[in-house]
Amino acid sequence: MTDKQIQIFMDSLLPLLKAAVAFTIPLAIISFVLGLLVALLTALARLSSFKPLVWLAQFYVWIIRGTPLLVQLFIIFYGLPKVGIIIDPFPAAVIGFTLSVGAYGSETIRAAILSIPKGQWEACYSLGMTYWQALKRAVLPQAARVATPTLASSFISLVKDTSLAATITVTEMFQVSQQITAAQYEPLLLYSEAALIYLVISSVLSYGQARLEKHFDRYTAR
Amino acid sequence: MLEMKKLKKSFGDIEVLRDIDLRLEKGKVLVIVGPSGSGKTTLLRCINLLETPTEGEMTVGDLQLTFSPGTKLRKIDILELRQRTGMVFQSYNLFPHRTAVENVMEGLITVKKADKHESRSLAMEMLRKVGLEEKAEAYPYQLSGGQQQRVGIARAIAMDPDLLLFDEPTSALDPELVGEVLNVMKALAAEGRTMVVVTHEMKFAADVADTVVFMDNGRIVERGTPDEVFRQSANERTKAFLSRVSGTEPPVQATF
Ligand SMILES: Nc1ncnc2c1ncn2[C@@H]1O[C@H](COP(=O)(O)OP(=O)(O)OP(=O)(O)O)[C@@H](O)[C@H]1O
Ligand SMILES: [Mg+2]
């Protein structure tokens, strides 16, 4: 690296980190939390005995899983204004990512709930618990353990996927790296720098995932 | 305490319980025996409505329920009934993510809305009763089968049910662990608890039961004291079954 390149690298580090802290990370966290909520409700709808609810959930998952996330973001941000629905870039991205996490996550959560033995429900019911009490006290805590590795992976994917928000004008980290590149003509350097920051964030999250899994392992034989 | 009249249960087209009539007084122990598939588990699960009977009537305490196809039970009746009954499962069904004492506290906290402190001390008392005080902080995976089942019993009695239901509580256990569980059950019977027990432990049945019913193919084909059913039965099916579970000929053969 030339001195000039080192200078550019150092100068762009702060704006990139700022964008990560102000947009990339909040976008990922907000979308993931909301997405998990949507995923849980969708999973429960799919497991319900009320058919219309099942169909609604299936339809939602079918649409989201069957179309590209990038296209969904374009529809929300560039398409909806045509019918009078105008959403700012950041909330538009949150909506897009939330729907995505909700759809994929619902499959994970549904499978995790189904993996809990029927006897657990019955033990709750025999104590006099309602469906919601059984779900909250026995089934979801155990399902959470089953779903954690998959959900953690999708959170890490989500952090990287937030770069797609650049295409709908959210000034997240990748967008900022593009802006600096346009001024400095150092695409290899600057995009690699952005990649490095994504890598650091992902690694921290992977470590967090390992800790979480270990926490859940306290009640199982190794 | 418990009464069933013409109780029926079908799964689809298969009739699993046919016209069950049953009465159990407070403080008595009823043991259900019978071959595999005869409907013992289903009968037990009908008592706490884990299965909904198709037709008939059932009374538990002062709660009276009538079943008919197409009518749904009221949720509050179901919950009420389940609070009055406690169930002990063949496969224990302990909550694996909770310690022994937390397992016993669970119903108290969630269903009875008792406070944490009281629940814990009551749960400890129950664990003492089943001889597991010192295992209070162990997770289920750290306990033997017999210990897990005793926690299961403690969990059920902590709710102070009027009626205790046991579905083959010892049949998943290694032979050397059966005794500790049966002893706890004997102590409960001696305390005057009302119990319905499905088991293949004939010695336990003979010692503890006030009434034994023999089920076959969804019907109660014989009922009486243990002595009447085990020693004096004239029913061929009963005799054949008894000789199979005990591995010997029926004790009293007609010799005339
Ligand atoms: N959920 C169900 N759906 C359909 N059939 C069922 C269901 N549960 C039980 N059965 C059938 O009902 C019959 C009685 O079953 P049940 O489990 O009550 O017998 P059991 O006397 O407890 O037998 P075992 O000694 O093997 O435990 C069996 O033929 C069984 O296949
Ligand atoms: Mg059975």
Image (cartoon, grey):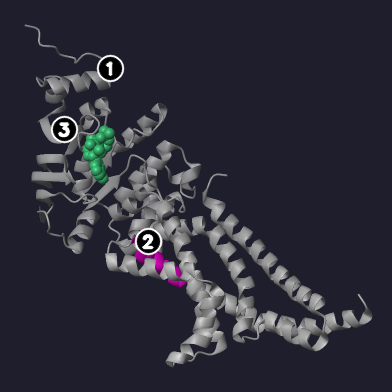
Percent position of residue B219, x then y: 12, 35
Q: Label 3 vs label 1: CA separation?
A: 22 Å
Residue ID at (16%, 27%):
B226
Please name which of the two marks, 3 or 1, marks the residue nearer to the observer.
Answer: 3
Q: Which residue: 21% across, 13% down?
A: B249
Q: Amino acid at mark 1?
A: Gly
How far apart, in angstroms, are the residues tagged by discs 1 and 2?
44 Å
Evaluate whether residue A221 shows in this view. Answer: yes
Instruction: Find residue B217 and name its label.
Output: 3
Q: Which residue is mark 1?
A: B247
Residue picked out by circle 2: A135
Q: Residue at x 91, y 83 (%)?
A: A4
Q: Which mark is residue B234?
A: none
Magenta segment = A37-47
The reply to whether the magenta stretch includes residue A41 is yes
Amino acid on which the number 3 mark rests in the picture: Asn
Q: Is residue A4 above or below residue A135?
A: below
- For label 1, being within 8 Å of ligand 1 is answered no
Q: Give the quadrant of residue A53.
A: bottom left
10 Å crowding of disc 1: few (<14), some (14-19), many (20+) = few
**Disc 3 secondary structure class:** loop
B2 and A71: which is toward the camera: A71
* Residue B174 colored in magenta in the image: no
In space, the residues marked 2 and 3 are separated at their CA atoms by 35 Å
> In this view of the protein, which residue sits in the foreground, A47 or B148?
A47
In the image, is residue B47 above or below residue B169? Answer: below
Task: Tell me the chain of label 2.
Answer: A
Q: In this orientation, does residue B131 appear? A: no
The spot of residue B99 in percent (x, y) is: 46, 51
